[in-house]
Image (cartoon, rainbow, N blue to C red):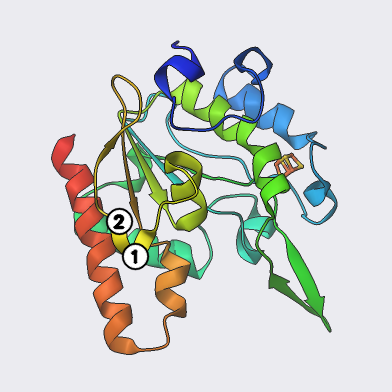
């Protein structure tokens, strides 16, 4: 398995490479259940770790778990998961062949009455959780990494990256891994105008088709 710094130089790692957890995805998932590296473990029902084949050629990286993901312990199972499934099907990418994960592995929310409203993980929480994404990248070593949404894209390509300007553009991540970013399905769902929502959905499908095209 390659070294993280040598092969993934554009993915800023929170820890020296020798401190990134190692093991099979199953082992990593088990270790991540006990993670207390940031305060978010107190918020969530459980750690929501990545799922998919350990030799998947494509890794989809979302942002952080939502309410349904938190309850079920799986990434992309809520409304945004439904939209992602539809886009993947249209693009000809079977989800079962992909490794699907998030940048941050715990749900963060604020309470409004009884409702748990999604709250974005802050920079320190994102930095603390990068060791798990780094561990997944090292283990799965995908040929293509797809960042869905600004948090994932900026983790891969740097803070200056803008989805609105740079989505759909290929970038090299090390010697044999390429990266691309697109809209997060929940961002598409939140767009108030129907016309813009449909456009963004079309762009997401186009970007996923580009991924299918290089496999
Ligand atoms: S969000 Fe990430 S770093 Fe923070 S406790 Fe959960 S798994 Fe650990």
Q: Which mark is residue 122?
A: none
Q: Looking at the picture, how far across and down is residue 182, in whole percent?
A: 34, 56
Can you say which quadrant of the picture contains the N terminus? top left
Q: Which mark is residue 167?
A: 2
Q: Is residue 62 visible?
A: no
Q: Is mark 2 within 8 Å of ligand 1?
A: no
From this view, report whether residue 110 is shown above or below residue 27: below
116 or 157: nearer the eye? Answer: 157
Mark 2 touches mark 1? (CB < 8 Å): yes
Q: Looking at the picture, how far across and down is residue 189, in whole percent?
A: 43, 76
- Left or right side of 35 for 153: left
Residue placed under numbered mark 1 in the picture: 164
Residue drawn 35% across the image and 50% down it? 181
| SS label for mark 1 | helix
From this view, report whether residue 42 is shown above or below residue 57: below
| SS label for mark 2 | loop
Residue drawn 77% across the image and 55% down it? 44
Residue drawn 47% across the image and 57% down it? 150
Q: Quadrant of ligand 1?
A: top right
Q: Find the distance from the CA under tag 2 to the CA under tag 1.
A: 6 Å
Residue drawn 40% across the image and 23% down it? 141
Q: Looking at the picture, how far across and down is residue 143, in whole percent?
A: 30, 28
**How many C-alpha atoms fall within 10 Å of the one at disc 2: few (<14), some, or many (≥20)?**
many
Q: Is residue 208 visible?
A: yes
- Left or right side of 140 for 143: left
Q: Is mark 1 within 8 Å of ligand 1?
A: no
Q: Quadrant of residue 107?
A: bottom right
From this view, report whether residue 43 is shown above or below residue 171: below
């Amino acid at each position: 398995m390659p070294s993280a710094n040598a092969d993934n130089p554009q993915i800023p790692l929170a820890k020296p490479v020798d401190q990134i957890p190692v093991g099979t995805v199953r082992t990593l998932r088990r270790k991540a259940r006990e993670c207390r590296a940031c305060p978010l473990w107190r918020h969530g029902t459980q750690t929501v770790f990545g799922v998919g084949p350990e030799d998947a050629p494509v890794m989809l990286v979302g942002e952080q778990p939502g309410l349904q993901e938190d309850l079920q312990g799986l990434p992309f199972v809520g409304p945004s998961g439904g939209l992602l499934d539809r886009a993947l099907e249209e693009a000809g990418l079977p989800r079962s062949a992909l490794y699907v994960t998030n940048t941050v592995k715990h749900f963060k929310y604020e309470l409004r009455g009884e409702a748990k409203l999604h709250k974005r993980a802050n920079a320190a929480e994102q930095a603390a959780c990068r060791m798990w994404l780094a561990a997944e990248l090292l283990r799965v070593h995908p040929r293509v990494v797809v960042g869905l949404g600004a948090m994932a894209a900026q983790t891969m390509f740097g803070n200056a990256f803008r989805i609105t300007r740079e989505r759909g553009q290929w970038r090299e991540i090390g010697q044999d891994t390429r990266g691309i970013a697109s809209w997060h399905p929940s961002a598409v769902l939140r767009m108030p105008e129907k016309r813009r929502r449909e456009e963004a959905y079309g762009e997401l499908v186009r970007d996923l088709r580009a991924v299918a095209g290089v496999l």
